[in-house]
Amino acid sequence: MTVKEKVKLKPSSNGFNEEARSEDMFLVLYNDEVNSFDFVIESLVDVCKHLPEQAEQCALITHLKGKCDVKKGSYNYLKLMKDSLISKGLSAVIE
């Protein structure tokens, strides 16, 4: 017989608990009508360290489908990237 350990989750001010932060999440880029295709590619290369081909594919998917998962990782890992993309005028969220 095995015993499951109960884990207490502490609420935090941003709505995420400690367990959720350690799980993989996605940095999602949303399409907009403001930024150029080239600017989006340059931003993904600069901020997310994508190769130019990968950034171009993500930009195309974002343009055609309205959004694209551009990076996977923990909340803390993605937070700075999301903030950097937003500061460049792009629309991004962590889901």
Image (cartoon, helix red, strand yellow):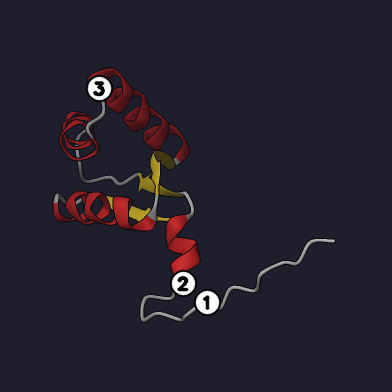
- The residue positioned farthest toward the top in the image shown: 53
Residue 36: % across, % down: 19, 35
Q: Which mark is residue 9?
A: 1
Numbered disc in front, either 1 or 3: 1
Q: Are marks 1 and 2 in contact (CB under 8 Å)?
A: yes
Quadrant in the rendering for residue 1:
bottom right
Q: Secondary structure at mark 1?
A: loop
Q: Are marks 1 and 3 in contact (CB under 8 Å)?
A: no
Structural crowding at the residue carrying mark 2, measured as other residues with C-alpha within 10 Å and reported as few (<14), some (14–19) or many (≥20): some
Could you say which is closer to the camera, residue 47 or residue 58?
47
Circle 3 residue: 51
Vertical side of 34 occupied by 10: above or below: below
Pointer 1 or 3: first along the chain: 1
Looking at marks 1 and 2 on the same chain, the residue that comes earlier in the sequence is marked by: 1
Residue at the spot 66% in from the left edge and 69% down from the top edge = 5
Quadrant for the C terminus, please.
bottom left
Of all residues, the one furthest to the right in this rendering is 1
> Residue at left 47%, top 37%?
65
Residue at the image position 31 percent from the left and 51 percent from the top: 78
Callout 1: few (<14), some (14-19), or many (20+) C-alpha neighbours within 10 Å? few
C-alpha span from label 3 to label 2: 33 Å
The one nearer the camera, 68 or 47, is 47
The amino acid on which the numbered mark 3 sits, given as a three-letter code, is Leu
- Reading the image, the residue beneath label 2 is 17
Q: Which mark is residue 73?
A: none
Report which quarter residue 56 is drawn in. Answer: top left
Closer to the observer: label 1 or label 2? 1
